[in-house]
Image (spheres, rainbow, N blue to C red):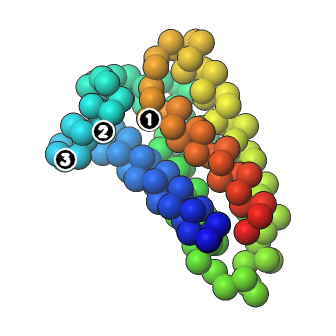
Amino acid sequence: MLTFVLIGLVLIGFLISLYFTLVYLDISVPVIDSVANFCRFDTRQCQKVIETESSHLFGVANFVLGLFYYTVLFLYLILPSSIAWIFFILVVMACWVVVILSLYLAFELRYVLKIPCRLCFTIHGMNVAIAVLILFV
């Protein structure tokens, strides 16, 4: 059951990263408007968030790293347990590195940029949940 919860969180994280990718590439999809409504601002505000210096790590946009991260987590979660245990420590370490980065980015959004990005805070919270729950799979 816990694995299914984690897969759900990972898929949502992937979709949020994909959303930011579409906004960045200025690709118009009807779902973008509904996500922007959740955020209570238009896609220009999202564009502002993803163009900040802190939205890139080692020159790569965080949402691109997110697509990679959530894909790797998904693959890990669907591996048979007889193989998955080999990667457990690496996955747990990656999850907690992402939590540390998420805390930094949340602080940056809230106190430096002063942008109330609900979608960003949602994904940061999900990253914490994933890191905690992955310990029990």
- For mark 1, does the 10 Å Cα neighbourhood hold few (<14), some (14 to 19), or many (20 or more) residues? some
**SS at mark 2?**
helix
- Mark 2 lies on residue: 35
- Mark 1 lies on residue: 119
Tag 3 and tag 1, C-beta contact below 8 Å: no
> Which is more foreground, mark 3 or mark 2?
2
**SS at mark 3?**
loop
- Which three-letter amino acid code belongs to the residue tagged 1? Leu
- Mark 3 lies on residue: 29
Vertical side of 8 occupied by 123: above or below? above
**SS at mark 1?**
helix
Q: Earlier in the sequence, mark 1 or mark 2?
A: 2
> Residue 129, image x and y in percent?
65, 48
Q: Is residue 38 left or right of residue 127?
A: left
Residue closest to the far front? 1
Q: CA distance from mark 3 to mark 1?
A: 17 Å
Q: Is residue 68 visible?
A: no
Q: CA distance from mark 3 to mark 2?
A: 10 Å
Q: Could you say which quadrant of the image residue 54 lies in?
A: top right
Q: CA distance from mark 1 to mark 2?
A: 8 Å
Quadrant housing the C terminus:
bottom right
- Which three-letter amino acid code belongs to the residue tagged 2? Val
Q: Residue at x 75, y 47 (%)?
A: 96
Vertical side of 108 occupied by 25: above or below? below
- For mark 2, does the 10 Å Cα neighbourhood hold few (<14), some (14 to 19), or many (20 or more) residues? some
> Residue 3, image x and y in percent?
62, 69
Q: Earlier in the sequence, mark 3 or mark 1?
A: 3
Q: Residue at x 49, y 33 (%)?
A: 120
